[in-house]
Amino acid sequence: MNKIRKGDEIIVITGKDKGKRGTVSRVMMEEGSVLVDNINVVKKHQKPNPAVGATGGIVEMEKPLDISNVALYNPATSKGDRVGIKTLEDGRKVRYFKSNGEVLDA
Protein backbone atom coordinates (compact mmCIF):
# COMPACT_ATOMS: atom_id res chain seq x y z
CA MET A 1 0.00 0.00 0.00
CA ASN A 2 1.36 3.39 -1.03
CA LYS A 3 1.58 6.19 1.49
CA ILE A 4 0.99 8.88 -1.15
CA ARG A 5 -1.70 8.42 -3.80
CA LYS A 6 -3.13 10.31 -6.75
CA GLY A 7 -5.43 13.10 -5.57
CA ASP A 8 -3.72 13.57 -2.17
CA GLU A 9 -2.86 17.08 -1.04
CA ILE A 10 0.85 17.32 -0.28
CA ILE A 11 3.31 19.95 0.91
CA VAL A 12 6.88 20.22 -0.38
CA ILE A 13 9.41 19.92 2.46
CA THR A 14 12.69 20.55 0.59
CA GLY A 15 13.91 22.21 -2.57
CA LYS A 16 13.11 25.39 -4.47
CA ASP A 17 9.36 24.98 -3.92
CA LYS A 18 9.60 24.35 -0.17
CA GLY A 19 6.36 25.17 1.65
CA LYS A 20 4.13 25.04 -1.43
CA ARG A 21 1.02 22.87 -1.43
CA GLY A 22 -0.47 21.00 -4.35
CA THR A 23 -2.45 17.99 -5.47
CA VAL A 24 -0.75 14.82 -6.71
CA SER A 25 -1.65 14.20 -10.36
CA ARG A 26 0.49 11.11 -10.90
CA VAL A 27 2.54 8.69 -8.80
CA MET A 28 5.49 6.96 -10.47
CA MET A 29 6.50 4.16 -8.09
CA GLU A 30 9.20 2.77 -10.41
CA GLU A 31 11.19 6.01 -10.11
CA GLY A 32 9.93 6.83 -6.61
CA SER A 33 8.56 10.21 -7.62
CA VAL A 34 5.31 12.15 -7.82
CA LEU A 35 4.00 14.72 -10.29
CA VAL A 36 2.24 17.61 -8.53
CA ASP A 37 0.01 20.26 -10.14
CA ASN A 38 1.79 23.66 -10.50
CA ILE A 39 4.84 22.55 -8.47
CA ASN A 40 8.40 22.16 -9.81
CA VAL A 41 7.61 24.00 -13.04
CA VAL A 42 10.72 24.27 -15.24
CA LYS A 43 11.45 25.93 -18.57
CA LYS A 44 12.64 23.67 -21.37
CA HIS A 45 14.14 24.88 -24.64
CA GLN A 46 12.47 22.79 -27.32
CA LYS A 47 13.52 22.47 -30.96
CA PRO A 48 10.84 22.61 -33.64
CA ASN A 49 9.80 19.29 -35.17
CA PRO A 50 8.15 19.77 -38.57
CA ALA A 51 7.34 16.05 -38.90
CA VAL A 52 5.02 16.24 -35.89
CA GLY A 53 4.04 19.86 -36.40
CA ALA A 54 5.46 21.02 -33.05
CA THR A 55 6.77 24.56 -32.89
CA GLY A 56 9.99 25.40 -31.12
CA GLY A 57 10.53 27.76 -28.22
CA ILE A 58 10.69 27.86 -24.46
CA VAL A 59 8.07 25.56 -22.93
CA GLU A 60 7.08 25.46 -19.27
CA MET A 61 6.44 21.97 -17.93
CA GLU A 62 6.00 20.20 -14.60
CA LYS A 63 8.72 17.79 -13.59
CA PRO A 64 8.39 15.03 -10.99
CA LEU A 65 9.52 15.46 -7.38
CA ASP A 66 11.16 12.72 -5.39
CA ILE A 67 8.66 11.12 -3.03
CA SER A 68 11.00 11.75 -0.08
CA ASN A 69 10.78 15.52 -0.66
CA VAL A 70 7.03 15.73 -0.09
CA ALA A 71 4.78 15.08 2.91
CA LEU A 72 1.04 14.58 3.13
CA TYR A 73 -0.75 17.76 4.24
CA ASN A 74 -2.63 17.39 7.52
CA PRO A 75 -5.50 19.94 7.67
CA ALA A 76 -5.89 19.48 11.44
CA THR A 77 -2.36 20.72 12.16
CA SER A 78 -1.89 22.76 8.93
CA LYS A 79 1.50 21.09 8.40
CA GLY A 80 3.07 18.23 6.51
CA ASP A 81 2.76 14.94 8.36
CA ARG A 82 4.14 11.43 8.29
CA VAL A 83 1.80 8.64 7.31
CA GLY A 84 1.48 5.13 8.73
CA ILE A 85 -0.52 2.09 7.70
CA LYS A 86 -2.62 0.06 10.11
CA THR A 87 -5.17 -2.72 9.85
CA LEU A 88 -8.67 -2.14 11.24
CA GLU A 89 -10.79 -4.73 13.07
CA ASP A 90 -12.64 -5.64 9.86
CA GLY A 91 -9.34 -6.42 8.08
CA ARG A 92 -9.09 -3.25 5.94
CA LYS A 93 -5.73 -1.51 5.66
CA VAL A 94 -5.94 2.26 6.07
CA ARG A 95 -3.52 5.19 6.15
CA TYR A 96 -3.35 7.43 9.21
CA PHE A 97 -1.47 10.54 10.30
CA LYS A 98 1.26 9.72 12.80
CA SER A 99 0.90 12.97 14.77
CA ASN A 100 -2.76 12.70 15.75
CA GLY A 101 -3.81 9.20 14.64
CA GLU A 102 -6.52 10.50 12.31
CA VAL A 103 -7.50 7.94 9.64
CA LEU A 104 -7.29 9.10 6.00
CA ASP A 105 -9.12 6.32 4.14
CA ALA A 106 -12.28 6.00 6.21
Image (cartoon, grey):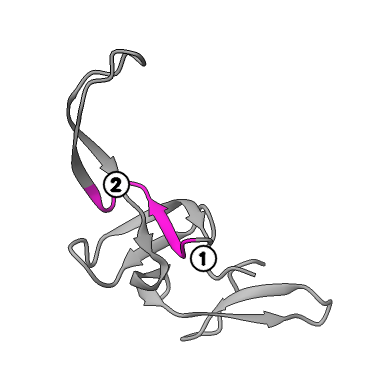
Q: Is residue 39 magenta?
A: yes
The boundaries of the magenta stretch are 31-41
Q: Is residue 82 magenta?
A: no
Describe residue 33's horizontal placement relative to residue 103 as left or right: left
| Label number found at residue 47 | none
Q: Is residue 36 above or below residue 71?
A: above
Tags 2 and 1 touching, CB below 8 Å: no
Which residue position holds label 2? 38
| Label number found at residue 4 | 1
Q: Residue at x 24, y 47 (%)?
A: 41
- Give the structural element (helix, strand or loop) at label 2: loop
Q: Is residue 61 above or below residue 24?
A: above
Residue 50 image offset from top left, x and y in percent? 28, 13
Residue 17 in view of the camera: yes
The C terminus sits in image quarter: bottom right
Q: Give 58 or 41, whichever is nearer the viewer.
A: 58
Q: Residue at x 81, y 82 (%)?
A: 89
Classed neighbour count for the residue bearing mark 1: other residues with Cα under 10 Å, few (<14), some (14–19), many (≥20): some
Residue 15 image offset from top left, x and y in percent? 21, 67
Residue positioned most to the front: 51
- Give the structural element (helix, strand or loop) at label 1: loop
Residue 54 image offset from top left, x and y in percent? 29, 18
The kind of residue on which mark 1 rests is Ile
The N terminus sits in image quarter: bottom right
The kind of residue on which mark 2 rests is Asn
Identify the image quadrant of residue 51: top left
Describe residue 14's horizontal placement relative to residue 52 as left or right: left
Q: Give 106 or 6, whichever is nearer the viewer.
A: 6
Q: CA distance from mark 2 to mark 1?
A: 18 Å
Residue 20 image offset from top left, x and y in percent? 26, 61
Q: Residue at x 41, y 67 (%)?
A: 67
